[in-house]
Amino acid sequence: MNYASLFEKVQRGHTLSQTRGVGILRSDVFARTHGIEHGFSTRLGGISPQPYASMNLSLTRDDSRENVLRNYRIFFDAAGLDIGRAVLVNHEHGSNIVRVDSSNAGQGLFKEPLPFCDGLITNDPAAILVTLHADCGCCYLFDPVNRAIGLAHAGWKGTYRRVAESLAKSMAREFSSRPDKMLAALGPCICKECFEVDEGIADDFVSEFQYESLKKPGKPGKAYVNLESALILQLCSAGIPPENISSMGLCTYERSDLLYSYRRDKGMTGAMIGYLLLTP
């Protein structure tokens, strides 16, 4: 496979909009795509105090539940969406995918969480898919033919376990989605210049995806891993053409003004959400 040609075909670009101080990032490609709404939150516009300032959307940090729920309401109001339709992933850094619909509305936020899963799929316009992030990748999928969507949280473990590929295969199984007709977008994540891991983990990525450039040497015993490229490779492995894939192209670690980063802030940080829904 000609990897250089493959990556050159991936489109890049994002737009940041602000409504009443709330920042929302969107893929330029998905923003032009009819039939869906999507976005990725920033740290702008919420009420959480330091070190979570200010739009923390994680219920598992040492931030009050009242603050987080208020942030959700502020964010969904700014996005023009009904918070009651939200279905939150219950991630465990794996590759399990769960199909949801309107009957799951509120789970993970106002109702009991879903079973452990790192990806959600639906063909129900009444459900808003939501994933949480603070360095981990966010993968959006849209099947415009059968009108189905998928959204995944992709940490390094889930990426290694091919969660994005599992997302595409789950849509094919549940909705008869053809990968060659799917559109994919990737949200912000920690970039290849900032994600340093044990060298053995980097070697595992190279072995799994058969691409030496996923790894870059670091300090002795360490190396850097390109999570975004690993996600692109598995989307292509699932049958999605590289020209149907786009990336927002933002690093969570580098953009402390805009984005949370678990690694940069040594765990004392908030979390952002990705969201995706079908529209008429």
Image: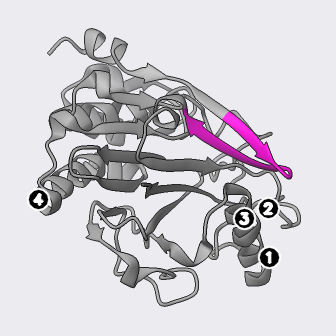
* Residue drawn where x is 72% and y is 64% of the image: 77
Q: Is residue 87 above or below residue 274?
A: below
Q: Nearer the viewer, mark 2 or mark 4?
A: 4
Residues at badges 2 and 1 in contact (C-beta under 8 Å)? yes
Residue 190, percent from left and from top: 55, 38
Q: Amino acid at mark 4?
A: Arg
* Residue at the disc numbered 1: 67
Instruction: State the separation of the CA atoms marked 2 and 4.
Output: 39 Å
Q: Is residue 85 above or below residue 242?
A: below
- Residue 52 circle label: 2
Q: Which residues are magenta?
A: 16-27
N-term-proximal mark, 3 vs 4:
3
Q: Amino acid at mark 2?
A: Tyr
| Horizontal arrangement in the rendering, residue 16 relative to residue 6 (left or right) | right
Q: Amino acid at mark 3?
A: Asp
N-term-proximal mark, 2 vs 4:
2
